[in-house]
Amino acid sequence: MKHYRLFILLVLSIFIISCKITDKNKEIPITVDMIDLENPPTMKFELTEYNFDTISIGSSISYSFKFTNNSNSPLLIHSVKAACGCTILKDWPKTPIAPDGIGEIPIEFTPKAIGKQKKYISIIANTRPATTKLYLVGEVIGV
């Protein structure tokens, strides 16, 4: 009976893993013809600096940096990184963004220190310059 349960668990595990692999294959592949070195894409953000005003330590805020691909070639975001552990990146577009297409980079900020704050997020993409920085600014007060 123990072997039967183990076998069922193994079969279910393989099924779940194979579903995840299949989902990843649905992403649009990035090919060389999508990269235009002469006219690289540009990211036009609604805001490059979000002022969260004043929040209490221990609380958190969520915000999405919205942008448009203002170019004639696909925008490819390679990576998005937060400068500190207090900023969590929720997700970002992993597939090419078409010309005039829109996207967003959602974050959650949970401050760990009191005082004026200026934290940044780095985006590496096929833009010129390759790195774009977005900022969170405001003041964190005690409880």
Image (cartoon, rainbow, N blue to C red):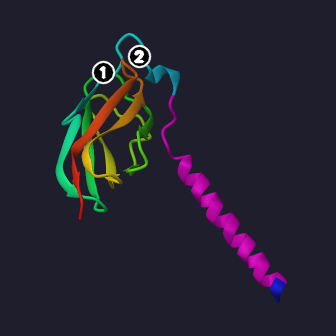
**Percent x, y of residue 30:** 50, 31
Tag 2 residue: 36
Report the quarter where the C terminus lies: bottom left
Q: Is residue 29 magenta?
A: yes
**Percent x, y of residue 38:** 38, 10
Tag 1 residue: 72
Magenta range: 3-30
Which residue is at the front of the view, 46 or 19? 46
Residue at 22%, 36% (x, y): give it: 49
Residue at 51%, 21% (x, y): give it: 32
Question: Which label was assigned to residue 87?
Answer: none
In the image, farthest residue toward the left: 53
Q: Quadrant of residue 105?
A: top left
Q: Earlier in the sequence, mark 1 or mark 2?
A: 2
Q: Quadrant of residue 101?
A: top left
Q: Secondary structure at mark 2?
A: loop
